[in-house]
Amino acid sequence: MNKGDFIKFISENNNCTQGMAEKVINMFTSSVIDAISKGNEISLIGFGSFSVQKVEAREGRNPRTGNALKIGAYNQPKFKVGQKLKDAVNKK
């Protein structure tokens, strides 16, 4: 499901216009990006948690040439699934 399909899904299941659904999705995603880029963790009980994990600098290899190269440190966005979401996906 792409963003357009998801907008349609939200509007059909929540009795709102597609414009309103798109606005909600855009507000949510931009707010998550803004909050975690400032180092905040977002925890939505039952759904999951958004956070940032620091990845240390390391040495790697170019798979094509085999030459060693340095990979710099960076921050990796992370999402940990909540139990309610996990249970919903694994219903039998």
Image (cartoon, rainbow, N blue to C red):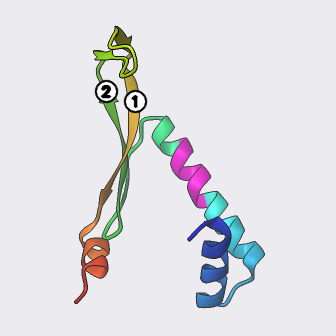
Can you tell which mark lies on residue 59?
none
Residue under circle 1? 75
Image quadrant occupied by the N terminus = bottom right
Of 46 and 88, the residue lying toward us: 88
Decide: is 68 above or below 78: above
Secondary structure category for the residue under label 1: strand
Query: How many numbered discs sit on the rendered protein?
Result: 2
Is residue 33 inside the magenta stretch? yes
Of 91 and 77, the residue lying toward us: 91
| Distance from Cα at disc 2 to Cα at disc 1 | 6 Å
Mark 2 vs 1, N-terminal side? 2
Residue under circle 2? 55
Mark 2: which amino acid? Val
Q: Residues within 10 Å of mark 1 (few under 14, many from 20)?
A: few
Tag 2–tag 1 contact (CB < 8 Å): yes
Residue name at image x 32 percent, y 67 percent: 45
Toward the front, the furthest residue is 64
Mark 1: which amino acid? Asn
- The part of the image, by quadrant, that contains residue 71 is top left
x%, y% of residue 33? 54, 45
Residue name at image x 32 percent, y 16 percent: 61
x%, y% of residue 41? 38, 46
The magenta segment: 28-34
